[in-house]
Amino acid sequence: MEVPYHNVPKDDVLPKTSNVLLEVFDIEKTFPGVRALKRVNFALSEGEVHSLMGENGAGKSTLIKCLTGVYGFDGGRIVFQGREIRPESPLRAISMGISSVYQEVNLCPNLSVAENIFAGRQPMKGFFIDWKTLEERAAAVLARFDLDIDVRRSLDSYSIAIQQMIAIARALDISSRVLILDEPTSSLDKQEVEKLFEIIRRLRGEGIGIIFITHFLDQVYEISDRITVLRNGELVGTYKTEDLPKIDLVTKMVGKNFEDLAKVSRVRSASPGDVILALEEVSAYQSVENVSLELKRGEVLGFAGLLGSGRTETANLMFGIDRNSGGVVRLKGTAVKLASPREAIRGRIAFCPEDRKRDGIVGELSVRENIILALQARRGVFRFIPLRKQYELASRYIELLGIATPDADKKVNDLSGGNQPKVILARWLATEPEVMLLDEPTRGIDIGAKAEIMKLTLGLCQDGMAIAFISSELDEIVRISDRVIVMRDRAKIGEIEGDGLNQDNILRAIAGGGAK
Amino acid sequence: MERVKLRKTGGEKRKLGIDLKYIPALSAIALFLAAYAIGGILYGERGFLSMRTFATLFTDNAYLGVSAVGMTIVIISGGIDLSVGSVAALSTMMLAYGTEVLRWNSVLMLIVVLLTGMALGAFMGMLIDVFEVPPFISTLIGMFFARGLCFIISIQSITINDPLLRALGKWRIRLPAASRAAAYVNLSVFIFALVLAAGVVIMRCTKFGRGVYAFGGNRASAVLMGLPTRRIQIGIYTFNGFCSALAGVLFAFYTFSGYGRHLYGMELDVISSVVIGGTLLTGGVGYPIGSLFGIMIYSVILKFISFNGSLSSWWTKIAVGVLLLFFIALQRVTVVLVKRSKRELKRKN
C-alpha cells in the first residue's frame, strides 16, 4: 500500500487514522510563475490544536485558502470527515463546517453584536427578522464563551479582542468542525491572548479541530498539540510539539541551522555621539504627556511598552504627524516646530510606520518607484530624478538590503511579506537621513527577515545614524538597543541603559507603576 | 478576574445615554423643528404654521421624498446614484409620449415606466457588481443614457391630457383642519408615505436591508460572512431605479407634462437631503426616517423663501449648501467622538 506521506521525513508522527477530521493529500497549487504548494500533505485530528508554521512565502496562507475555498487547487485531494470535498467558495466551506477567523476581524462594525453573529441567517418570523429570538440566541451563543455583553450594541463599541471572540462565536455557531485561526493574536494584549487560549482549549475539548497560525513561537508551544512546518511550498514535516524543541522548529522553518537571530546583538557603543533630536517635556492633544528624551548619533534607542502605551504616538510626534501642544522639540540643538512629515523629512528624519500596508507601501507601484518616493518628495515635483539615476538608486538598495525581487520594476504587492519592510527602509535610506524612526519594523515578518532587518539597523547605526526602534518584542529591543525608553499610559516611565538593560528590568518597569 | 473585565467593557457609558451614530439623524429632526418654529415666529400671522402650509411641505416635495428613500438605501450601502434625476425625467417623457403620442393605455404605461426604471437600476447595479465599475461612474453612465433617451423620444415638452392620469394627479382629500384655509393631501403624499414605510421595514426587518447595512459597514466582511452580495448590490440599484421612476411619475402628476429638461440636478437635491437627514456618505449608517426630515428641512427652506417674497429662489441652493456643510462637519465630529470614546475605552481596559 502506498503511504500517502511520501515526502514526509522519517521522524514524523503519523496521525492516528481513527479520529482524523480533515486530510489533505498531495495538494498542488500553482500561480503564474510560482508553484505555491508542491504535493503537500496535512492532517488534522479531532480535538487537536495544530499549528501551521513556516516563513512568509512557505505556503501557509495558500494552503488555508485552498481549504476555505478562497482558491481552487490544481491537484491532490481534500478529505473531510471521510468524504472528498472541493469547496468552491468561503460560503461553501463554511456550510461544510470549515470556518476561519483572521487577524483582521471580518465582521461589520456598524451592526450590532447579535446581528454580526447571525448576519445572512437571521431567524425569521414570516417575511421579517425576528429580532427578539435573534438577540436571545446571540446572548446564548456568547454565554458559551463567558461573554456577558450587550448584544444589541454595535460591534465597534467593543475592543478588538472581544470582536475576535465574537467572530469565533459566529464561526462556530455555523456548525463548525474545523476552525482556522490565522494570526488571531497579533492585535491582542497578553491577557486577551490568555482568554482566547482558554476558549481554544475548551473548543479542543469539544472535539473541534483547530488550525492555528501565528508568528509568536511562545504561543505555538503554549497551545498546540502538533506542528506542521512548510517551507517554500513543500511539507517539511509534522511533529508532536513536545518532540520539537524551539530551536529545531526554527531550523526547520528557515531550512538551515539558524543562529543568526541569537547572534544579532551588539557591542554597545562606548561613546554615543552628539544629540540629534531631543524632546523636552513634550505633550500633544490625545497623544503623549510630558515626554523628554534624547536621540544620539550612532545609538539605537529602544521603545518598550504595551500596545497603546504611547510608543507610536511618540514616533508620530518626532515625524511631525502629530503636532506637540506643549514642550520643545530640538533638532541639533535648535528648537523646531515639526508641523508636518514634509518638514521632518527636510530635517533628515525618516519614519517606517507600523502599519506598512496602510501608511507606507504603495503596492501598485514598482519597487523602484516606492524607493524613490520620499527622495522625490523632498526634492519637489519639479526636480525630477532622471530615470537612470532612479534605477541606480533602486538597484543599489535592492542589493544592499537583499530585497528578493527579479528586477526593480516588479510591483511591491507581488513581493513576499518580508521584503516589503525592506522596500520602505530603502525608501528612507535613499533620502540619507540622520534620524531613523522604526515602528515595529519586524512585525509580521519571518525570523530570517527579522534578523536581517535587525542587522541592517545595527549597520546603519554604526554609520552614525540615530535610530529609534519601537517593538513589542522585548528580546529584540534588548538585543539591539543602547538605551531603552519604557512607556506606559502615554507617558515615559523610565529609561534603562547599561548593565541593567534586560527583559526583566523592562518588564518590571512596565508593570511596576501599575500597582495603584 | 478576566470575566469581570469583559463585563465592564460591555457596560461602558454613552454620552447623553444615546448611541453617537444617531446624532446626525436626531439633529436633523431638531433642526427641522427649530426651522419650523422660527418660520412660525417670523411668518406666523401669515399662516406659516397652518395645516395648509404644513400639508404643502409634503405635497410639493413628495416626489423628492420617494427618491430620497431609494437614495438612502444606496448611500447606506456605501454607493451613490447620480442617475435619479435623469431616470425621473425619462419617466415623465415616457409617460407623456406613451399616453399622448402612442395612445397606449395609461395603466399599462405606468407599469412600463416603473419597469424601465427598475431595469435601468438593475443594469447599473450589474455594472457595479459584475464589472466592478465604481457606482459614481456606472450611475453617471445611467444618467447620460436616460437623459439622452428623453431627447431621442422627443425634444418637445408634451402635455399630459390622459383623463386617468389627470384624475390621479388632481385627486386629493381635505384634511379636517381647524383653520379657515382648507388643507389638502394628494395621492403623491400617500405614495410617499407607502414608500417610506416600505423603506423603513425593508431596512429594519429584512435580510436584504440588513445586508445593505453590512455592505456599507465593511464590504469585504460582508463577502466573507457569506452574504449574497450580488443579489444585494443589484437589488439596491433596482429598488432605487424604481424609486426614481416613481418620483418621475409623481412629478408628472404634479406638472402634467413630460419633458427632457425636467428635473435637472434633482439627484443632488436628493443626495443633500439624505445627507442632511443623517445618512453617512461613507456608508453603513443612516435611516429612511432621517431622510424624511432631510426632505422636510429642504421644504421648509423653500417655504421660507416663498413666504419672504423678496428673496431669490436661488437662496434655497445656498441654504442647502450651508446646511450640507454643517451636517458633513457634524458627521466628522461624530466620527471623531466615536473614535475618541473607543480610545478611552481601550485605555481604561
Image: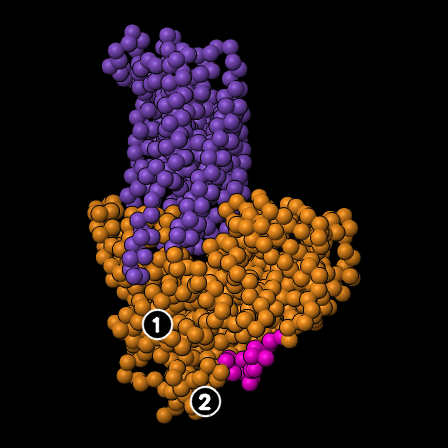
- The image shows residue A425 at horizontal and vertical percentages of 64, 63
* Nearest to the observer: residue A109 or residue A131: A109
Q: Quadrant of residue A275?
A: bottom right
Chain B visual colour: purple
Which subunit holds the residue at mark 2? A
The amino acid on which the numbered mark 2 sits, given as a three-letter code, is: Pro
| Residue A9 numbered mark, or none | 2
Residue at image coords 30%, 84%: A17
The amino acid on which the numbered mark 1 sits, given as a three-letter code, is: Ile
Query: Which chain is depicted orange?
Result: A
* Mark 2 crowdedness (10 Å alpha carbons): few <14, some 14-19, many ≥20: few
The quadrant in which the C terminus of chain B is found is bottom left
Mark 2–mark 1 CB contact (< 8 Å) = no
Q: Which residues lie in the magenta part? A: A250-266
| Residue B116 numbered mark, or none | none
Q: CA distance from mark 2 to mark 1?
A: 24 Å
- The image shows residue A436 at horizontal and vertical percentages of 65, 61
| Residue A210 numbered mark, or none | 1
* Nearest to the observer: residue A387 or residue A282: A282
* Nearest to the observer: residue A100 or residue B182: A100
| Lower position in the chain sequence, tag 2 or tag 1 | 2
